[in-house]
Image: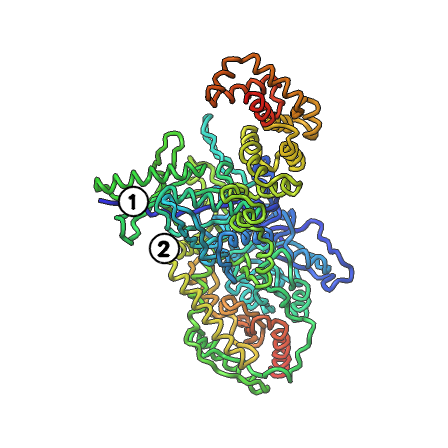
Amino acid sequence: MNYEAVIGLEIHVQLNCSTKMFCDCPNIPGDEPNQNTCPICLWMPGALPQFSQEALEKATLVCLALNCEIQKQSAFDQKVYYYPDLPKGFQLSQAHRPLAKNGWMDIVGEDGNQKKLRIHHIHMEEDVAKLVHEIEGRTPISLVDFNRAGSPLVEIVSEPDMRTPYDAMEFLRRLRTQIRYTGSSEGSMEQGTLRVDANISIRQRGSNELNTKVEVKNMNSIRNVGDAIAYEIKRQTECLKTGEPILLHTRLWDPEKHITTAMRGKFEGPCVPDPSVPHIIISDKWLCHMKSLLPEMPNQKTQRFIKQYGLVHEEAAFMTSERDISEYFEVVVSKKASARTSAHWIATQLLPILKDRNQKIKENPVTPERFAQLLLMLEHDEINTNSAKEVLIRLFDSDRTPEEIVEKFGFKQISDTSEISDLVEKVIADNPSAVANYRKGHEKALGFLIGQAMQASQGKANPKRIQEILMEKLN
Amino acid sequence: MQSDIFTYIDPSPFSLMENGPLTGKSVVIQPNMSVRDWPTEAGSAALERYIALEDATVVERLRQAGANIKGSSRMSEMGFGLGGDTGAQALADGIADIVLITDTLGEARVAASTIGAIGFKPSHGIVSRFGLIGLVPSMECYGVLANSLADISDVMRVIAGNDDHDLSMLEGKVPDFDKNYPIEESKGSLAVIQECFDLLSPEDSQDFDKTLKRLNQAGLNIEKFRLADFDLFSKVHKVIGSVEASSAGGKYDGVRYGHRTSSASNWNEMFLKSRGESFGLLVKTYMFQGAYFQFENYKAFENACRIRARLLKEIEGIFNKVDALILPTRRSNIPVDTTLGISKVYDAFLMTLLANVTGSPAISLPGLISRMKNDPGLQIIGPHLGDARLLFIASQLKNIAKRDI
């Protein structure tokens, strides 16, 4: 029988607000345990929640970036469950009246066709405390760190429109880019600021029914999500074939063993309207203002880069894949470096070095000004490509300008005709057999001779000039 | 004996203002109202040895107005019902001029009626709940007991008004307690809900009817309304109140404060045992009932919310025609006793629940139905935010009574 998977995602995004959602405590979960707490986030008797305007703004930007309709009125509910990570026996979340509904994102599917994936809704909620279980020692103890309790989150609930692990991964990549562009969140699965749960069910291809779904948690990269979904599809398909029933439950992805294991029955606590946090009523004026704060998003920016800078689509898409990259690129280009050279060098030289150094473009010690100067020297034939790469590496560990480094390390390109002429004549004299081969029509021999000349110049000669002079002398 | 009345006496009471509106007034509060550094156990082991971290907004405002907060009285667990409460006694004994009792089911009004004092429950949302250790957020509020309407007005002037700490308050909609409401501006009519007579003993019914006749003779229109849904107020309160109590009580887990069980092998057991040992039977049953609606019968809760909205509309309709509702404060033949279970507790508050469900202001006046010891108290209820006018009407009724009795 021919099966297909039905996949929906629930994505928690930690907003990078300065305070928690319902109090003024710093939103820095990683600080010394229980340092960032107050009577409100510890929910001491008599405390009442405040509400962070910043959280509402950042959440709204995320919703707008994902093409959602912001609801004129939304409200918080109490999601009731009892666990030590919840200081008040419920989590404040928007179960009945979410902030935004009906979003979507386009992805290009595996078959190369564009596919619209819908978002059911996005709601705000608070994060819970962190539990540390110390099981070693005579008496196992559980410690609670309330630093994270009350951190602002949004939860994005997709429609079950995805059919393959690839769909889910593309959706997440696009979603992550959009969210990062808004500046509302770091959106990192590795660091836990983006957490993804996947709901997967299996049905006969062509059918419309929604079968019992299984929830999978604990993936800490987009690749993990793809792998976990692929595993789950395989597992459930086997179940169907052997007639084993599929039960509603939650499974944990094991990134070491590449399998999912059953964790618990899926628990849905009741959600009761909260009487203490006021309803959120959004005016047209405020919404207009928020829309005006939304930056130029990747799709528009890609189109603009193609038009304004003459990049090809692939280059433009890469330069806009992260807001920081696009902004770096634009500064470099504004310093008169050629757009395509800039795009090429950012993609093939700068970013790989940063990756090796485990740095983000924001932490890049090579300012766009210095990077542009380097590219200009390259374009003006003052240095050759090899030297430029060497200079770039040195720029990372020095505050000097590219000119100073070129000067200091003697990277200046030799373009002087007589100097190159001398080099070429020496190479011709030293390599009679290669010269003979070239004259017999072996084109490869020319490359060898150019290489010899470059070597003789310690990589500083202008290879184009070498070739010209070499050919002149040989013909 | 003062020690029988107080759970805590301030060793060095102070007032901030020499010429404040409440200078010289002694106030007794309950230990579910936070005063920094005071034991604040709200009558429950769930808050065993809990010391408040901050002043409640109301406490801060009272002190700034010159009031001398002497201490806190005994109270029923979490202020639910009246059981062993001593706040009213403090007023009756002359220990306090003003007593604050939370009004969740009607406790402040009923307690006042039992000692022949005035009990006032303000509109929901005009007094900050910051620092109040509550149980039913959408229906409870500070209630004020005093011997004169002037004291009640003075207290309300001080404690009502916006507070940045309480976002659930109604912004900018505080009644003007300084304003005069000339009688000509009123409709001069009061509404009686006929169904309440069915709940009264023959004696109460007779006395209440006589009062209505006297008021009528004094020139007030007494309009009779039928409200077939009158019994729904208690049902709605019970469902919504228990659900809110279950949520509000969720924070008492013994992790950060309060009673923690002496032995448990894991956190789940610790929760269960700590909570089980902390709450008294009544509050435990009430929370359990709320959990039932949350987990097992959410539909009933939704229905209760919908019915509450409808009841609000019906009452609003009546207030379009009359100045206030008039009914006894309590049924003098029904004991107020928290040991008898939820239903019996509600039975004792059937006359007062309406104002908690609708968020209306309500006041209980003594000596208007009966001069006997067992006076049930005369209650008038005004439209939401009509607090100041209600106090004015109350003063008019007292004047009429003075003339006629």
Image position of B57 with respect to A215: above or below: below
- Percent of width and height locating residue A332: 63, 40
- Percent of width and height locating residue B100: 61, 60
Let me know if residue B31 appears in the view.
no
Tell me if B385 is positioned left or right of A441 in this view: right
- Percent of width and height locating residue A41: 56, 46
Q: Amino acid at mark 1?
A: Leu
Q: On the rendered image, what quadrant is the C terminus of chain B found in? A: bottom right
Let me know if residue A222 appears in the view.
yes
Mark 1 falls within which chain? Answer: A
Q: Which residue is mark 1?
A: A247
Report the residue at 59% width, 68% height from top.
B120
In the foreground, B297 or A389: A389
Report the residue at 61% width, 35% height from top.
A363
Q: Which quadrant would residue A16 be assigned to in this image?
A: top right
Mark 2 falls within which chain? Answer: B
